[in-house]
Image: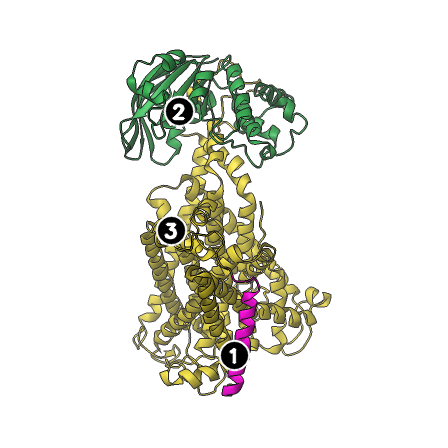
Chain colours: A green, B yellow
Amino acid sequence: MAKRIDVSGLTAYYGSHKAIEDISMTVEPRSVTAFIGPSGCGKSTFLRTLNRMHEVTAGGRVEGKVLLDDEDLYGTGIDPVSVRREVGMVFQRPNPFPTMSIFDNVAAGLRLNGSYKKSELNDIVERSLKGANLWNEVKDRLNKPGSGLSGGQQQRLCIARAIAVEPNVLLMDEPCSALDPISTLAIEDLIGELKERFTIVIVTHNMQQAARVSDRTAFFNLAAVGQPGKLIEIDDTERIFSNPSVQATEDYISGRFG
Amino acid sequence: MGTSTQITDASPPAPQQTVDKRAARGATRPGDRIFLGLSRGSGILLLVIMAAIAAFLTYRASLAISKDEGNFLTTFQWDTNAVPPVFGIAVLAFGTVVSSIIAMVIAVPIAVAIALFLTHYAPRRLSGPIAYVIDLLAAVPSIVYGLWGALILVPHMNGLFGWLNDYLGWTGIFSWQGGPARSMLTVGILLAIMILPIITNVSREVFRQVPQMHEEAALALGATRWEVIRMAVIPFGRSGIISASMLGLGRALGETMAVATVLSPTFDIQASLLDPGGGTFAQNIASKFGEASVFGQDALIASGLVLFVITLLVNGAARAIIARRKEYSGPTHEHRNHHPKGPSTLRGARLPKWSPYGIAAGSIAVAIGIGLAAGLHSRVQWGLIAAILYVVGTYAIAAAVEGKRQAKDRVATSFVWVAFLLAVIPLASLVWSTVARGVKVLDVYFLTHSMGVVADTEPGGGIYHAILGTLEQVGLATLIAAPIGVLTAIYLVEYGRGNLSKAITFFVDVMTGIPSIVAGLFILSLMLIFEMQPFGFAGSLALAILMMPVVVRSTEEMLKLVPNELREASLALGVPKWRTILKVVLPTSIGGITTGIMLSIARIAGETAPVLLLVWGNPLINPNPFEGRRPRCRCTSTSSGRTARAPVRRTTAPGRRRSP
């Protein structure tokens, strides 16, 4: 059920400002692809174009193609709502719904999209929480509010919520930047397990993290402030971190700038 | 639902999902379309109502003005029964503007100071209950303020008036011939007291929303509390303060019952603010309406139209100011205080903790001394001297010991405290006198009997008919206004972009400032056109018009507080927008929205003027809102037998509750 993403000639705008320009890449199914690059280079913007969340922001606009197994997400008649069911997302800061319990948070995507029998929901919630390595910690307090969990637990709850609707692709926008090292480790382990079932794309500022979790790494950069961000190169993670083909990439990962 | 063809099947999500093209054909889903249509329709309805108000008032007004023999704008006379009729609004315009200016000059600085006091100065344990009481006071019906003003404020003004006459009488503005203090200045002060809670309320909300990090950034630069307020809090809240003031100004301009109760009106313009006389639009409408013929009513509608135009202009001006100030209202342009030049040691000289009390006691003692020595009789004067001494003393002593910046901070602190204490006196008196006087007649009999068989001049009877009428009309108004208001707010926050939402936002602001009497006149003009008799539902309609903008504004604020991340989290799960709004956004903000609706109910429950115009009232019980005069105790006279009744209502006014 994991799907391949093929992006070609993608340009995204905020109003009249061009945020990213002419990006083309392929994301392989059942793998982890990491986006790295300095702040403002458009990694997150690009990530958000992959499930049509970019157009939610005022003035957001996209040109180009994003193929999900040969189906263009920006083709005519495509419903962004259906796209987002296929391509799930985990945000930088954990954002469980404050009015819902842990159980309801995980079930939210299913319940808000249609009706389910209680027993089915129970199964799916348990499966998702187990999938997010959170089941053992919360199984006795499923009816407590999700906001009562620790930051790391909240983030895993958000992952459980995202995988409960069984998407094909999981986008993660700096999922660990608000977490401590222990919680980060838990999430990274989880990413390793999830890639057996999903196509995962992760934006990270932490280069060690990119090296640890990803199979392929894409480096983004921008020529100057105010210029659109561009994809510099994408390659196997090992190669990017040992022998990148572009000088700028080597400068960035060796800490010479950015 | 029909909107989610993809996962509605009972089986768990099948592994072979594809982007469902059948569901995807067409730009939006039916659910989204219906919901958008509903909310946009509500917004448009508001615009239509505004247009209708302007159109119908203009129509009825033109009927009257075309027969007016005098110049409508400059005539000092209001004689609609004369043949030919002669009337003009010069006196009313003057009185309305003057009393409102007085009210604003007094109320705005004090209200802002109280808001600062509650958010930044008061001990936490104190600020909660005080804020609650002030919220409550904002919902007190204006007629209660009017009764309090007539019974308590007017007699207490004599001291102040004498003092002003003695020292400032030569200006002409403050000369006083010793008549009763039912004058423009008293009205202005009463209006100031009335709008104080509203302005305080809104400003406090704005100050509370100043991002913690802005204040911490200022603190981290070594700013004193006052400097934090000047650098971070005031710039952030400036546009909020302006809109709060406009809200207050709107109420002051259109206040009817309080002015009518306190002022002894004359139809001329006089220089002195202290001598009784003058008039305002709303007061004139209320006092002339009872005996007016249909033509007379049209003439009053014409004056209401002018009032409407004035509120439109004021709101437009305020919005222009806010728009121009917006780009400047960042905390970044204040550079002077960023580099404290104080001594480099960490432990600067500090005054001991008791020093404010010490200085206060000292200045009071000196003031009493001066007062006795100079033979000053007026206590007001003693207080003034003490206050001046206190401020000067604090500044001088603190400047000497702690440095200039600390001195400024201390003066600001004492100003904020003084403003708060100053405002507490009338507000506490209001609460005390209504409760103390009202409780005497309040018993079960009073609550369960009508005035049906009791003459106005006799004791006895009760308010059962009034309770019933209030509940019925307020309930109907809420049923109309709450859904429209909430849907409009949803449109503005969740969908609104472009000119339509700008127009709606603007007119909602304008509508907030519509004097209640104008809403009443609007429904009245409809009733005149269709030749209907007064009936209860007309009152409900006018109340609904007053309620809608309040609901829109408060709901809008609450929806804006819902973090965008939650919307995105829901959208990223593939939830359609309308379900996101219904299931995620609304539940998150439902507490605040309910509070807003309760507040607006409180506002209209105490509304007097429009109900008086449209419903008339009836001492008997009439449960049918669509026929005949409605029972409604909005005490039509100030005869002593009735004054005791007003207090009952205000104790039932729902207060504001803070919800998580």
Residue B529: give x, y in percent of width and height: 41, 62
Marks 3,1: beta carbons within 8 A: no
Q: Secondary structure at mark 1?
A: helix
The answer to which image quadrant residue A45 occupies is top left
Q: Nearer the viewer, residue B249 or B77?
A: B249
In this rendering, is residue A207 above or below B403?
above
Mark 3 surroundings: few (<14), some (14-19) or many (≥20) residues within 10 A: some
Is residue B366 covered in magenta?
yes
- Numbered circle sitting on residue B367: 1
Mark closer to the observer (2, 1): 1
The kind of secondary structure the magenta stretch mainly shows is helix
Q: Amino acid at mark 1?
A: Ala
In this rendering, is residue A79 above or below B338?
above
Identify the subunit bearing mark 2: A
Q: Amino acid at mark 2?
A: Leu
The answer to which image quadrant residue A252 occupies is top left
Q: Secondary structure at mark 2?
A: helix
Q: Secondary structure at mark 3?
A: helix
Please provide the residue range marked out in magenta. B351-375
The answer to whether any part of residue B65 appears in the image is yes
Mark 1 surroundings: few (<14), some (14-19) or many (≥20) residues within 10 A: many
Is residue B466 covered in magenta?
no
In this rendering, is residue A178 above or below B426?
above
- Numbered circle sitting on residue B338: 3
Residue that sits furthest to the right in the current view = B444
The answer to which image quadrant residue B10 occupies is top right
- Numbered circle sitting on residue B379: none
